[in-house]
Image (spheres, rainbow, N blue to C red):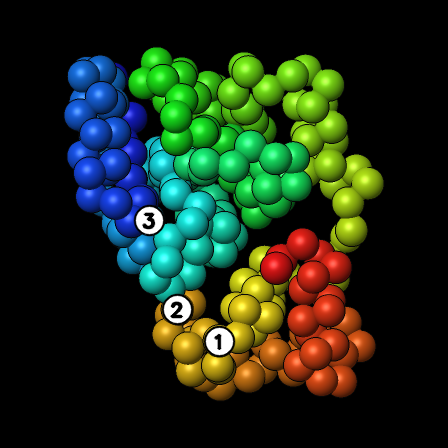
């Protein structure tokens, strides 16, 4: 049986080294690649097609883990994505799952929990992993909202959502193109379509819509 392949994405080399060591203590798990930014993670995921991606949320350079997850979910749909975060509040977790993550891990979780999470999300395409220490009622609320209940419905495609997120964070069309590995003309076309779909006239309108969708 082939081992489960894993891509590590974290801006701290020591964190990646530590996770790699604990994972490779298990003969059925192998790390096939590492990235320290969301921008690096996207082409690596496409090239490596890993079974599981451990994705840090907050990375200071380039796009963050949530935007990278939206892109990878569109381009590498079979990879399972587990988000690594320091924050355990409900809105934060819901935003990660809504981006397409298959589960969430806290950076202070034990090595056993990381391995359990990896194996759990591989059981089915719809498996969602949340740490056991999250109370049951909280878990239920998070899962209901992240799957569409009581959550604003976006009018945009996953790619348009990525473009809007970057625009709302202040990136220029050229910077958006560079980060998503598309042309400036494609960004301009997406931007025009987004403005039409959400009835926006100005950049401020786009930012307000992004905020209403919890993109910023």
Give the vertical position of 103 relative to 116 (above or below): below
- Is residue 109 found left or right of 146 in the rendered image? left
**Residue 96: x %, y % from top left:** 56, 42
Residue at position x 25%, y 45% in the image: 12
- Is residue 169 found left or right of 183 in the rendered image? right
Image quadrant in which you'd find residue 90? top right
Whether residue 40 can be seen here: yes
Circle 1/circle 2 CB separation < 8 Å: yes
Residue at position x 55%, y 32% in the image: 88
Q: Nearer the viewer, mark 1 or mark 2?
A: 1
- Does dot 1 land on a helix, a strand or a loop? loop
- Does dot 2 land on a helix, a strand or a loop? helix
Quadrant containing the N terminus in the rendered view: top left
C-alpha separation, residue under disc 1 versus residue under disc 2: 10 Å
Give the vertical position of 74 relative to 205 (above or below): above
The disc at residue 171 is 1
C-alpha separation, residue under disc 1 versus residue under disc 3: 23 Å
Give the vertical position of 83 relative to 197 (above or below): above
Give the vertical position of 13 relative to 214 (above or below): above
């Amino acid at each position: 049986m082939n081992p489960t392949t894993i891509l590590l994405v974290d801006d701290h080399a020591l964190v990646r080294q530590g996770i790699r060591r604990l994972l490779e203590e298990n003969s059925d798990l192998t790390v096939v690649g590492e990235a320290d930014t969301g921008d690096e993670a996207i082409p690596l995921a496409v090239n490596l097609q890993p079974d599981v991606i451990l994705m840090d949320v907050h990375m200071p350079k380039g796009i963050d883990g949530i935007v990278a997850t939206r892109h990878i979910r569109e381009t590498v749909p079979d990879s399972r994505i587990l988000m690594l975060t320091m924050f355990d509040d409900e809105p934060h977790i819901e935003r990660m799952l809504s981006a397409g993550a298959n589960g969430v891990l806290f950076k202070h979780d034990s090595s056993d929990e990381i391995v359990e999470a990896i194996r759990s999300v591989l059981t089915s395409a719809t498996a969602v992993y949340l740490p056991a220490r999250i109370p049951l009622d909280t878990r239920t609320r998070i899962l209901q909202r992240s799957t569409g209940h009581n959550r604003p419905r976006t009018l945009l495609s996953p790619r348009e959502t990525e473009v809007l997120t970057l625009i709302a964070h202040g990136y220029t069309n050229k910077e958006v193109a560079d980060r998503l590995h598309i042309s400036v003309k494609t960004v301009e076309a997406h931007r025009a379509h987004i403005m039409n779909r959400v009835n926006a006239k100005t950049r401020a309108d786009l930012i307000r819509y992004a905020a209403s969708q919890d993109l910023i």
